[in-house]
Image: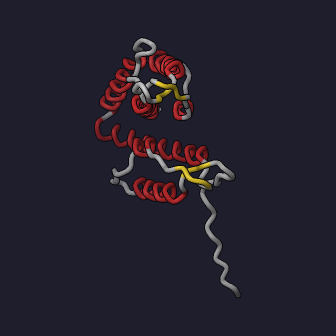
Amino acid sequence: MTDQTAAPAAPFPHTSGRQRGYRPEDVDEFLARARTAFEASGAVDIDANTVRTVAFPLVKRGYQVAAVDAALGRIEDAFAARERERALSQAGARAWVGQSRQLAQEVLDRLTRPKGRRFRRAGVLRFGYRVDEVDLVADKLARFLESGEQLSVDQVRGVAFRMQRRGYSEAQVDAVLDAVVEVMLAVV
């Protein structure tokens, strides 16, 4: 009998041709850490925010970005649900709702600033997110926060903007999008 050790199947499809994807070693390492953190009852080195903001280098023959991002979304949801349950049991529903409401109000205050002035602009010779596209999304997010207009977490996670010279600061826009996701997950 021959010893045929098959390589384990990759958890995600790989890119092909000229496409680039997330470096598999980094994704695999992060997912292993996330699993360990989730299974350990008191671990706090990885939380929903860590999952939401993780970044991986792009390489040829990497994991397909969309597949990994979808998995990360599910993992973030699981961490957020656990964090919500812990907070509810420790501080109570009133404190949890108050904290979520305060964050939602801070985000809403930012999103309802005048169009074209909602975020810091990139430098003169630098690129940032297209102002008109961000303002359009900001209006939709504000309507969600103000009146509950239909919007899913996946829609917020999947938003993408083209670039323009002197556009909005990517870091600021991304931080607000992350805060909206956090509010949405807090009340699910």
Q: Could you say which quadrant of the image residue 12 lies in?
A: bottom right
Q: Quadrant of residue 168?
A: top left
| Residue at left offset 42%, top offset 15% | 112
Classify residue 73 as left or right of residue 81: right
Tell me if residue 86 comes above or below residue 38 in the rendering: above
Horizontal and vertical percent position of residue 144: 49, 20
Q: Residue furthest front?
A: 125
* x, y percent for residue 182: 42, 34
Q: Position of residue 45 (x, y in %)?
A: 34, 52
Q: Residue at x 45, y 34 (%)?
A: 185
- In the rendered image, the residue lying farthest to the top is 114
Question: Going by the image, does 10 lie left or right of 99?
Answer: right
Is residue 148 visible in the rendered structure shown here? no
Q: Quadrant of the N terminus?
A: bottom right
Residue 82 quadrant: top left
- Say whether residue 60 is left or right of residue 165: right
